[in-house]
Amino acid sequence: MKRILTYGTFDLLHFGHIEILRRAKELGDYLVVAVSTDEFNAIKNKKAYHNYETRKKMLESVRYVDLVIPENNWEQKRDDVKDYKIDVVVMGSDWEGNENFENLKDLCDVVYLPRTEGISTTKIKKDLGLGDL
Ligand code: C2G
């Protein structure tokens, strides 16, 4: 049973999110998604349209996702990998080389997958004239 872990805000769930979840699941058998809490989003300077509970429920309805846990801070990743017996941490390529993930390489594999071009939560908001909602 190969166990995969990924992190994100996953606001206004879109095709780019689905594509990273699909490809992450393809690397193993069980996918854990750590979704940023509203408090952690504030630390990341991100304001999500949907609150944590909604973003969690939406992710739980995605066929590739087996478990959704909260991402409360930057520091929890090593414990997450140990607690959930993770074999591979997967992130989109915008995170490539980031210390938060490079630091996990003594515990598990870390894989960066190409971002899905042409879609992002920011672009959706902009295109819909939602400004900084
Ligand atoms: N993503 C993607 N293609 C897109 C948009 C997003 O592959 N067009 C990926 C990102 O690279 C990330 C995941 O989808 O791996 C979630 O993206 P966000 O919700 O924007 O998450 P982020 O703010 O990058 O949070 O501790 C890590 C952070 O919580 C990651």
Image (cartoon, grey):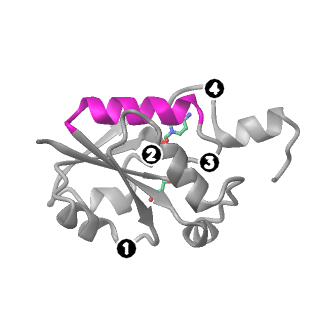
**Is residue 73 or residue 55 the one in the foreground?**
55
> What number is the disc on residue 75?
1
Q: Residue at x 71, y 43 (%)?
A: 122
Q: Neighbour class for label 1 at 10 Å: few (<14), some, many (≥20)?
A: few
Q: Neighbour class for label 2 at 10 Å: few (<14), some, many (≥20)?
A: some
Residue type highlighted by circle 1: Glu
The residue labelled by disc 2 is 60
| Position above or below: 74 against 35 | below
- Span highlighted in magenta in the image: 14-29
The image quadrant that residue 103 belongs to is bottom left
Residue type highlighted by circle 2: Glu
Q: Which of marks 3 and 1 is nearer the N terminus?
A: 3
| Nearest-to-viewer mark from 3 and 1 | 3
Q: Where is residue 102 in the image (x, y as percent from the top left)?
A: 29, 56
Q: Real-space Cα distance between discs 1 and 2?
A: 24 Å
Q: Neighbour class for label 4 at 10 Å: few (<14), some, many (≥20)?
A: few
User: Could you say whether the residue bearing mark 3 is in a helix, strand or loop?
Assistant: loop
| Nearest-to-viewer mark from 3 and 4 | 3
Q: Real-space Cα distance between discs 4 and 1?
A: 31 Å
Position of 126 with respect to 54 (left or right) is right
Residue type highlighted by circle 3: Asp
Q: Neighbour class for label 3 at 10 Å: few (<14), some, many (≥20)?
A: many
Q: Real-space Cα distance between discs 2 and 4?
A: 25 Å
The residue labelled by disc 3 is 11
The answer to whether mark 4 is within 8 Å of ligand 1 is yes
